[in-house]
Image (cartoon, rainbow, N blue to C red):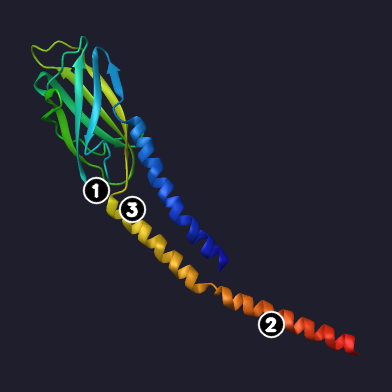
Amino acid sequence: MFPQLSHAKFSLPLAFLLVISVNELHAASAHTVKIAADVGGTLHIEPNDNPQAGSPAQAWFALTRKGGKAIALKECNCQLAVYAEPHTAKEPPLLEPPLKPVSAERYQATPGAEITFPKPGVYLLRLSGKPTAGASFKPFELKFDVTVASSSANVSQSIKNVNNDLVEAQSQSLPLWAIAAAIFATLGIVLAVVQKRRGR
């Protein structure tokens, strides 16, 4: 009876801390610049660099060559592969979304893709590319770790389940007045027995 109540009380704060830690972990990894050969890249994921499982997210890569000149998708024969972590070297990608030109911030027609991550967890996005005719940069491979959170619907359902468990556990425990009544009744019986023995 009491272990259930204790478990229910700590489940809600535990669920909250888990959601916060996943978001903090993701925020710390957002907008990391990766460099390979003479190409640098930064991953951006809309909305708010906070992808949620089961919902489409727009990912785009701000690519620049040495010197700061942006690389457009038409200048790069780029491929994107998505792996669920952990994965082995020979494991095929979980997803290979097609790249499309995206215009965002100061980047025009930069490589981008719509990705729907199947479940919460950590994923590796590997963007590899070679220059097309007329472009001047070395072939590259950039790897980005992405933490995907539960969808808001899943988090709401988890919190609802925890609240239901708490209500159920509280309804199964004895009310405080019943415990107090039992204590007073026991004390009354003990006092009566003690007085009876003293009276002899």
Give the mark nearer the N terminus: 2 vs 3. 3
Give the mark nearer the N terminus: 3 vs 1. 1
Left or right for 176, reference 52: right
Q: Label 2 neighbourhood size at 10 Å, few (<14), some (14-19), many (20+)?
A: few
Q: Residue at x 40, y 66 (%)?
A: 164
Q: Label 1 neighbourhood size at 10 Å, few (<14), some (14-19), many (20+)?
A: some
Tell me whether circle 3 and circle 1 mark residues in contact (CB < 8 Å): no
The residue that disc 3 covers is 155
Q: Residue at x 43, y 46 (%)?
A: 17
Looking at the rendered structure, the kind of residue marked 2 is Ala
Quarter of image, res 183:
bottom right
Q: Position of residue 151 (x, y in %)?
A: 28, 49
Q: Nearer the viewer, residue 145 or 28?
A: 28
Q: Residue at x 42, y 51 (%)?
A: 15
Looking at the rendered structure, the kind of residue marked 3 is Val
Q: CA distance from mark 2 to mark 1?
A: 58 Å
Q: Nearer the viewer, residue 198 or 78?
A: 198
58 up-or-down from 70: above or below: below
Q: CA distance from mark 3 to mark 1?
A: 13 Å
Tell me whether circle 2 and circle 1 mark residues in contact (CB < 8 Å): no
Element class at badge 1? loop
The residue that disc 2 covers is 185
Q: Position of residue 145 (x, y in %)?
A: 32, 31
Q: Nearer the viewer, residue 39 or 180?
A: 180
Q: Nearer the viewer, mark 3 or mark 1?
A: 3
Quarter of image, res 130:
top left
The residue that disc 1 covers is 54
Q: Label 3 neighbourhood size at 10 Å, few (<14), some (14-19), many (20+)?
A: some
Q: Nearer the viewer, residue 87 or 62?
A: 62
Q: Nearer the viewer, mark 2 or mark 1?
A: 2
Instruction: Report the quarter where the N terminus lies.
Output: bottom right
Left or right for 66, reference 163: left
